Image (tube, rainbow, N blue to C red):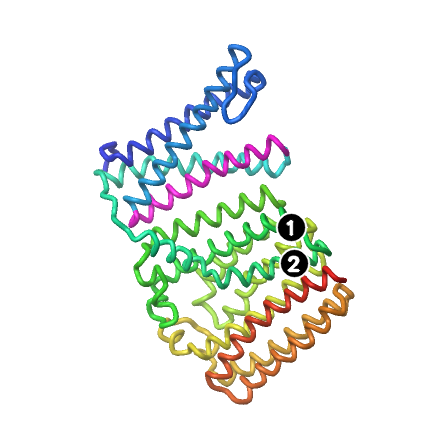
Amino acid sequence: MKYSLKSSFARATFALFAAMLALTIVGRYVTLTGASALCAGLPLCMPSAPLGWLQLSHQLLVGVAMLLTLWAFRKAWREQRESRVILPLTTVTTVLVFGQAFIGALRLANPQAHLTVLHLLTAVSLWIALAMLTFTSGVLIQKDGKPEVLDTRQRLKDFFALSKPLIVVLLLITTYGGLVIGSKALPSASLTMWTLLGGALAAGGSSALNQYIDRELDKNMQRTAKRPLADGRLTAAEGLSFGLALCLISYYVMAGMVNLLAALLSLAGIFYYVFFYSVWLKKATVQNIVIGGGAGAIPPMVGWAAATNNLGLTAWILFAIVFMWTPPHFWALAIVRMKDYANAGVPMMPVIRGEEETRKQILIYTVALVAVTLLLPLFNLTGTVYLISSIILGGFLLYAAWRVFKVGGNKPAWMMYKWSSMYLMFIFLAIAVDAVVM
């Protein structure tokens, strides 16, 4: 199919491409001539010499480009909900445009090397995404789309559900535990806000991408059949676009407002969960949860890195706690939902090796988990509050795991699943409290 500007969306993206090209050319001349010094002020300046008008033109073009970006973004989400090419490309382009401006502004105040590299990488990525969007919109869209009348309140609920908010909260608690123990006190409100915001966006975006990947599989499981993508309340393109946007924004927040190490760790967690676990491991091996647990174990390391800008022994022990917690937690759920996983073709341990072996492994991993939690006081990295808490909490969890092993059935497994969730939350709250009072 040939390229055409018959549709208003294709014309919008072409206008955006032209504006960005003009912005790039004028911006280059501003840099070469030093025109920015002759027209100071944001968002608009007052020229003090003829060359200063070049800088003012650059600022005006920035505004035009941003307005055109928002126009294209709005049209895509109103008219291209079904397109898994146009909607994600438009969404990513929009995030890159504003990410470029965000990092550019931060560089003016704090010209760090990693921000300069990120600014350059964003510029390259933006031009690739914009060129692809301009071309594909002219090829794939030959006439104007008709905006759909949608229930805004329900859609907001569905996008919220797409982020798996309960999992996000649990991961933020582990992130905060790492942040507090790294700070050895209550961290500043600013550092806490940016770290948790970046972590929430990364976790929510990863969850959305996971549901996009699993949308067909989820239809075969009672527990997940009513998820927004599996149920068809949101389109696959919307789920993909939403997940990509949150993940990209999370990196800009972490890199710009926290530090590079925390940003890279957060990005590693996204890739681990989305590609290593969701795309490959989940349906490839009975050890999917064991190996894939590394993704959920990264958030406390992010918190530690946000506070210290390094990775010490404490960070690795925090990682090990969540890593060892993951198998008994999810295997307990897998026992309860064994038929679901079998119907969906997911090789969870109860499906492949049977319930008896799974109950045994739950007990073994729980014993190992409790032992790992005691490494922190053993190496004198925490104090009395954490030591007492870890012993009490560990005792309750061991009792739950022992019941799963000896009694069997869904009721003890469900109790183990619920208790293990509470266990992780309270063990990291204990870490945070201990770091403050230690």
- On the image, which quarter does residue 316 sit in? bottom right
Q: CA distance from mark 1 to mark 2?
A: 9 Å
Examine the structure image and report whether residue 405 is included in the region drawn in magenta: no
Q: What's the magenta region?
A: 81-110
Q: Amino acid at mark 2?
A: Gly
Q: Position of residue 317 (x, y in %)?
A: 68, 64
Q: Position of residue 192 (x, y in %)?
A: 62, 51
Q: Is residue 251 above or below residue 24?
A: below
Quarter occupied by the C terminus: bottom right
| The one of 339 and 203 positioned closer to us in this rendering | 203
Residue linked to disc 2: 178
| The one of 423 and 254 positioned closer to us in this rendering | 423
Quarter occupied by the N terminus: top left
Residue linked to disc 1: 306
| The one of 424 and 278 positioned closer to us in this rendering | 424
Q: Position of residue 259 (x, y in %)?
A: 63, 45
Q: What residue is shown at x 48% (from left), y 73% (from top)?
A: 286
Q: Position of residue 179 (x, y in %)?
A: 65, 55
Examine the structure image and report whether residue 98 is included in the region drawn in magenta: yes
Whether the residues at callouts 1 and 2 have beta carbons within 8 Å, the answer is: yes
- Residue farthest to the bottom? 407
Tell which circle, 1 or 2, labels the residue nearer the N-terminal end: 2
Q: Is residue 222 above or below residue 87?
A: below
Label 2 secondary element? helix
Specify whether 218 is left or right of 362: left
- Residue farthest to the top? 50
Q: What residue is shown at x 39% (from left), y 43% (from top)?
A: 91
Q: Amino acid at mark 1?
A: Ala
- On the image, which quarter does residue 336 sit in? bottom left
Q: How many marks?
A: 2
